[in-house]
Amino acid sequence: MKITDLKSITNLNLKDVSFDKIVRKSIYWLRHSRTVIFVVVLSAGLMMAILTLNDILQQALSGNLSGGYSQTDRTTITRLNKLQTSDKNASGATLPSGRINPFSE
């Protein structure tokens, strides 16, 4: 630093500092460094996603998942287990007369 720089810092007058100058310099800085800001934000988001996935996988592998099936989930699982496969005919399915089943083989 030069001596003249130090003198200008010590002789700082608040009248020379204006809101307009600060805004203009901030906008100038943002325009010229938006790529850097984008890369930093993108990297932070990617790191956050990786750490979250890592935490989920670690909990799943150790068996410490705190969640469980709710009653709605158990009801749905029971209904899915009761479904029949396509090779079994549904015994209670009757069609009106004159109609054919488009899904029959």
Image (cartoon, grey):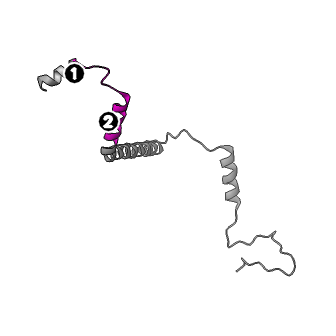
Where residue 58 sits, quadrant-wise, is top left
Q: What SS does tag 1 mark?
A: helix
Residue that sits furthest to the front in the current view? 15
Drawn side of residue 54 relative to residue 74, left or right:
left
> For this rendering, which residue is in front, 89 or 24?
24
Where residue 71 sits, quadrant-wise, is top right
> For this rendering, which residue is in front, 68 or 46?
46
Residue 42 x/y as whole percent? 37, 46
Write the start and end of the magenta stretch as one range.
11-30
Residue that sits furthest to the top in the current view? 10
17 relative to 51, above or below: above
Q: Residue at x 83, y 75 (%)?
A: 95
Drawn side of residue 7 relative to residue 101, left or right:
left
42 relative to 92, above or below: above
Is 64 a magenta residue?
no
Residue that sits furthest to the right in the current view? 97
> In the picture, which quadrant includes the C terminus?
bottom right
Residue 66 x/y as whole percent? 54, 38
Q: What SS does tag 2 mark?
A: helix
86 relative to 9, above or below: below
88 relative to 17, above or below: below
Hey, what amino acid is under mark 2? Lys
Whole-Å distance between the Cαs marked 1 and 2? Answer: 18 Å
Pointer 1 residue: 9
Hey, what amino acid is under mark 1? Ile
For label 1, count other residues whose C-alpha is less than 10 Å away and answer few (under 14), some (14-19) or many (20+): few
Residue 40 x/y as whole percent? 34, 43
Drawn side of residue 100 relative to residue 78, left or right:
right
Question: Magenta region's main secondary structure?
Answer: helix
Pointer 2 residue: 25
Is 24 a magenta residue?
yes
